[in-house]
Amino acid sequence: MATDSDTRDVHVRAVDEVDLVAFNTEAVRTSIDLVAHVTRADLSKPTPCADWTLHGLLTHMIAQHYGFAAAARGDQDPVLWKPRPLGDDPAADYRAAAEHVIAAFAEDGVLDREFPLPEFSRRYLFPGAQAISFHFIDYVVHSWDVARTLGRAVTFDDELLKAALQVAEAVPGGTVRLTPGSAFAPEVEWSGASGLDGIVAMLGRSPAWPQ
């Protein structure tokens, strides 16, 4: 995991001129559409997140939605970030969590708030735009993760990808990505990677996964 100073610096310059709330909503709604295709039989499939099956990835994604929604409203309870069991309808569980964070980020003044993010730091609060940029880039990448796991296509418009690239470029690299619990693996060398492939390669995924 990044140090506190690394975490507080990342993404700041990347969020100055983009509509983060709208882009985040688009990324999350794309993930809802993808997860709608998940069946119980899919849950044991491996994902581009090396430590997780699709079941593990979905429980992580759901927990992050609820955690960030709580943070947007100033709730510092780390229990709200804990994964919870999937029910009989994983797609419905996921949709409920995703709609919850979309609603939280749509509240007036959210970009002017300070977010407690206990998974990132127990000492600092994070500016709203910075916190939402963390969530935004995660759900661009996690949409790709789910799509690849299911063998489906995923696309984003050029303006969203331009904003996501700015955020990805601000994520610290180097040895911090080798630390247990780091959000992203070291950058993957990938000739000619551009668009979404370039972003996922920059953040440690092989665009050719599962090869």
Image: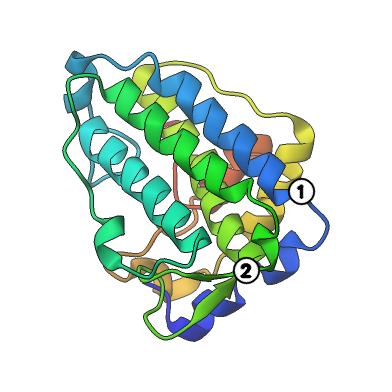
Q: Residue at x 18, y 27 (%)?
A: 87
Q: Nearer the viewer, residue 157 or 17?
A: 17
Which of 167 and 198 lies nearest the eye of the viewer? 167
**Circle 2 Cα neighbour tier, 10 Å, few/some/many (<14 / 14–19 / ≥20):** some
Position of residue 125 measured from the top left corner of the image (x, y, whole percent): 51, 78
The quarter of the picture where the N terminus appears is bottom left
Residue pointed to by mark 1: 19
For residue 109, say whether it is visible: yes
Mark 1 or 2: in front is 2
Q: Residue at (79%, 52%) from the top-left corner?
A: 18
The colour scheme of the drawn protein is: rainbow
Does the image show residue 210? no
Query: Where does residue 81 sit, x and y in percent of width and height?
Result: 30, 57
Q: Which mark is residue 113?
A: 2
Q: Amino acid at mark 2?
A: Arg
Taking the spot 23% from the left edge, 42% from the top edge, the residue there is 52
Identify the amino acid type marked 1.
Asp
Q: Is residue 118 depicted above or below 156 in this figure?
A: below
Q: Is residue 54 left or right of residue 25?
A: left
For marks 1 and 2, the one nearer the N-term is 1
Tell me the SS state at disc 1: loop
- For this orientation, the residue located farthest to the right is 17
Left or right of residue 56, residue 8 in this image: right
Point out residue 5 in the picture as x, y percentages from the top left corner: 51, 85
Image spot of residue 119 (x, y percent): 35, 68
